[in-house]
Image (spheres, grey):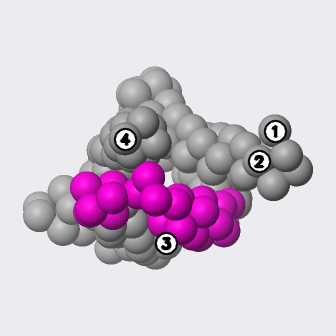
Amino acid sequence: MDVLGIILLLIRWAHALAAVAWIGGSLFMLLAARPALRNADPQGLVGRALAVEFRPVVTTAIAVLIVSGVILTVDRLTSDAAGIAYTAVLVAKIVLAVYAFGVAWLLPRRREQRAGGIRRALAGPVALTVVGIIVIGLADVLTWLFERGLVG
């Protein structure tokens, strides 16, 4: 493996690690912390403190995902192995990622408003986590499509 290959491998690793940190942390907050704190912290003080501490993780993850994503996209799209199906799935992944970035950016600002109904369903922490899981799944589809393109 040449130096460029090692650098791209490290960038892929950073991209995956950022996604896992963000979505894994979100799953922890939704499935473990939130239910545990519901009775133990009725005023929500600990939950808010957790959210404040998790915010830099999300911000760092978004920055790493954007920078590494641009580099990896250029690398893959300049290869002959990236066909039309690969490009279509990549566009879907990018659209969902941009949506998730927007929700993550707006979510702390909207907490005070306590939006309900459809707005909360589309822009709440559960929606953000579900979209993140879908994006991770699309990454696996992209890998499969790219490897299939390499074979022929």
Residue 17 is marked as: none
Residue 11 magenta-highlighted = no
Q: 106 above or below 85?
A: below
Give the structural element (helix, strand or loop) at label 3. Answer: helix
Task: Tell me the mark number nearer the camera, choosing from 2 and 4.
Answer: 4
Q: Is residue 93 above or below residue 106?
A: above
Q: Given this view, does label 3 or label 1 mark the residue nearer the observer?
A: 1
* First in sequence: mark 3 vs mark 1: 1
Q: Which kind of residue does numbered mark 4 sit on?
A: Gly
Please tell me whether mark 2 sits on a helix, a strand or a loop: helix
- Distance CA(mark 2)–CA(mark 4): 21 Å
**Mark 1–mark 2 distance (CA, rounded to whole Å):** 6 Å
Magenta-highlighted residues? 64-88
Q: Secondary structure at mark 4?
A: loop
Where is residue 31 shown, x and y percent of the image?
Answer: 40, 28
Between the C-alphas of marks 3 and 4, the distance is 41 Å
**Magenta stretch: helix, strand or loop mostly:** helix
The circle drawn on residue 5 is 2
